[in-house]
Amino acid sequence: MNYALIFAGGIGNRMNSKAKPKQFLEIHSKPIIIHTIEVFDSHPDIDAICVVCVSEWLDYMKKLVERFGIKKAKFVVEGGASALQSQYNGLKAIADSEKPTDGDIVLIHDGVRPLIDEATITDCINAVKKYGSAITVAPAIETVIRVDEENMITDAVPRNECQLARAPQCFYLKDIYALHDRARKDGTYNFVDSTSMMLHYGHKLHTVIGPAENIKVTNPADFYICRALLDAKENSQIFGI
């Protein structure tokens, strides 16, 4: 089984949206998170979807799943205090219900990355089968620098050695769930994401190049960029641009 775990447990303070969390802001009369979920729902190799949602909006999320006819959303569960906690809640919901086998794969994806594409999802699944993991990345197109405590530049990292970690981040379900449990027991459960946690515990991680437009909608500028990219995508289908 291949599972998509799509998490949107936060409220998005950087978006400056007082009415709704950023994942529920609409583009083309459809919430961002639904744009995201639909890509996984329509992928032939995704068997089930777990959506992790901020607790106050859980019922609303369930109504959206029904309204937009999301067929593979088997789980809609409450998020946690952090992105990592939200991921754990989703993994636990799947594991408790499904009794995962050694071959089960989970693709962990931000609910506010709606511009993921089918080809990248396929590449990620294949990479997990071959290498045991798949971290979606994009090439760094600007110079990355290191700074000291006084904000003085100490080093410029060669661009060809840098990539930007994005999503989905994909693993065998048993592996990532067990590691979440281990980190919680060790008291080291403060990682930025699953990639950081896997690296901390010595796992080798394989990268998959994803689309450059696979941005995370975090602030108002991201929202307008995402809308423009979705407009362009829609126009290309209509006009063949």
Image: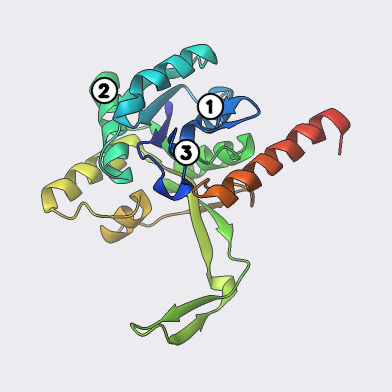
Which is more N-terminal, label 3 or label 1? 3
Q: Secondary structure at mark 2?
A: loop
Q: Residues within 10 Å of mark 2 (few under 14, many from 20)?
A: few
Whole-angstrom CA distance, mark 2 to mark 1, is: 27 Å
Q: Residue at x 26, y 33 (%)?
A: 89
Which amino acid, mark 2? Lys
Which amino acid, mark 1? Ile
- Asked where in the image residue 58 lies, by quadrant, the reply is top left
The label nearer to you, 2 versus 1, is 1
The label nearer to you, 2 versus 3, is 3
The label nearer to you, 1 versus 3, is 3
Which is more N-terminal, label 1 or label 2? 1
Q: Residue at x 42, y 47 (%)?
A: 133
Q: Is residue 111 visible?
A: no
Which amino acid, mark 3? Lys
In the rendered image, residue 37, in percent from the top left (x then y), is placed at 51, 28
Which residue in the protein does label 2 denote? Answer: 99
Q: Residue at x 58, y 75 (%)?
A: 143
Colour option used: rainbow
Q: Is residue 138 left or right of residue 218?
A: right
In the rendered image, residue 1, in percent from the top left (x then y), is placed at 42, 25
Q: Is residue 128 above or below residue 57?
A: below
Which residue in the protein does label 3 denote? Answer: 22
Which residue in the protein does label 1 denote? Answer: 34
**Along the viewing direction, whichever of 201 and 113 lies nearer the viewer:** 113
